[in-house]
């Protein structure tokens, strides 16, 4: 297999895996443990969950940008 194709496919697989891991963790804590819901008003778990979700999303976007920065279009 051509090294460029292998690098491109690995980049795709790693990007999808990281996004799915981020979603799984946030859905687990948000839905399963109930931190995403405001049943009885705001609780301490809501105050912790939402900023951590936003911060982790920023780190995820940063990771994806750095991951795809190494990819070059064919012919460049």
Image (cartoon, rainbow, N blue to C red):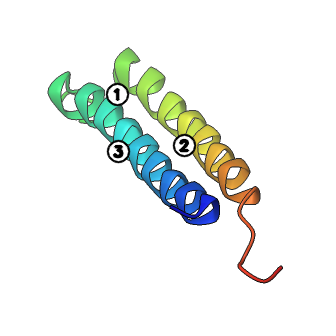
Residue drawn at the location 35% of the way across and 44% of the way down = 20
* Between 48 and 63, the one nearer to me in the picture: 63
How far across and how far down the image is residue 25, in percent?
Answer: 33, 30
Res 38 seen here: no
- Whether tag 3 and tag 1 are in contact, CB under 8 A, the answer is no
Residue drawn at the location 34% of the way across and 28% of the way down = 42
Q: Secondary structure at mark 1?
A: loop
* Between 44 and 70, the one nearer to me in the picture: 70
For marks 1 and 2, give the one nearer the viewer. 2
Res 75 seen here: yes
Q: Secondary structure at mark 2?
A: helix
How far across and how far down the image is residue 24, in percent?
Answer: 29, 36
Q: Which residue is mark 3?
A: 20
Mark 3 vs 1, N-terminal side: 3
For marks 2 and 3, give the one nearer the viewer. 3
Mark 1 vs 2, N-terminal side: 1
How far across and how far down the image is residue 29, in percent?
Answer: 28, 25
* Between 21 and 72, the one nearer to me in the picture: 72
Please say if 38 is above or below 10: above
Q: Quadrant of residue 34?
A: top left
Q: Which residue is mark 2?
A: 57
Label 3, label 1: how many angstroms apart (C-alpha)? 28 Å
How far across and how far down the image is residue 31, in percent?
Answer: 19, 34
Local crowd size for mark 1, using a 10 Å CA cut-off: few (<14), some (14–19), many (≥20): few
Q: Mark number for residue 42?
A: 1
């Amino acid at each position: 297999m051509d090294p460029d194709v292998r690098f491109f496919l690995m980049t795709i697989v790693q990007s999808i895996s990281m996004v799915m891991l981020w979603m799984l963790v946030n859905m687990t804590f948000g839905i399963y443990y109930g931190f995403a819901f405001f049943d009885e008003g705001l609780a301490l778990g809501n105050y912790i969950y939402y900023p951590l979700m936003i911060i982790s999303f920023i780190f995820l976007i940063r990771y994806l940008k750095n991951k795809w920065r190494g990819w070059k279009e064919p012919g460049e």
